[in-house]
Amino acid sequence: MAYDEELADRIRLMITPGPELSERKMFGGLAFLIGGNMAVAASGQGGLLVRVDPREHDDLLARDIVRPMVMGGRDMTGWLRVTAEAADDDAVLREWVDRGVGYARSLPPKQKPGTSRGPAGGR
C-alpha cells in the first residue's frame, strides 16, 4: 500500500521548514527527518508513524488511537503508530507531529554520508 499523499501534505504544512528538515521514502511511507533523525512518517500501512521519547512509550501506548510499531515481529520502543482515523483530525495530527518533531529536535543531528566525524584518518 502506498502512503497517503494528502496526509503527507498535511504533515508538511505542520512542520516549520528549515535546512534541518528533509523527507525520505522509508518503510513504504514518507518520513520527515529533523537533522537526519526521523520524526514522523505518513505510513505505507495507513496512519502516522511517530518517534517518541522511549520513556513515554508505554504511557502513550495506552491511548486508544495508538498502536505499537512492529518490525520483524517485535515492538519497537520509541516508535508508535497513530491510526489513520485519528490522523484525519487536524488537532490530533498536530499533537503527534509536534511530539515527533520535538523529540527528533532533542537528538543530536546525524552525520551526513561522506563527511568525517573527526580529524583525517580517524585519529
Image (tube, rainbow, N blue to C red):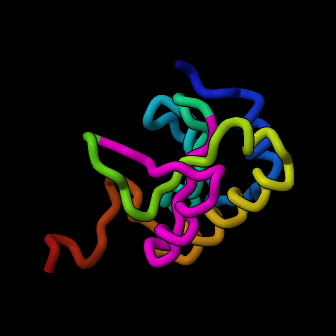
Q: Residue furthest top?
A: 1
Of all residues, the one furthest to the right in this rendering is 90
Instruction: Measuring from the top left, give residue 56's x and y in whole percent.
Output: 52, 74
Q: Along the horizontal axis of the image, is 59 left or right of 65? A: left
Tag count: 0
Q: Is 88 placed left or right of 27 in the picture?
A: right
The residue nearer to you, when weighing 88 against 6, is 88
Residue at 32% across, 54% down = 114
- Quadrant of the rendered structure where residue 50 is? bottom right
Frontmost residue, 110 versus 49? 49
Query: Within the image, what quadrant is residue 103 found in?
Result: bottom right
Q: Is residue 56 magenta?
A: yes
Name the quadrant of the C terminus: bottom left
Could you tell me which residue is drawn at 37 percent across and 45 percent down? 70
Residue 95, position in %: x, y?
Answer: 76, 61
Q: Which residues are magenta?
A: 47-71
In this picture, residue 40 sits left or right of residue 97: left
Q: Residue at x 21, y 72 (%)?
A: 120
Q: Does residue 23 show up magenta in the picture? A: no
- Residue 3 image offset from top left, x and y in percent: 60, 27
Q: Determine which quarter of the picture holds residue 94.
A: bottom right
Left or right side of 101 for 11: right
- 71 or 85: which is nearer to us? 85
Residue 6, image x and y in percent? 77, 29
Residue ID at (49%, 60%): 37
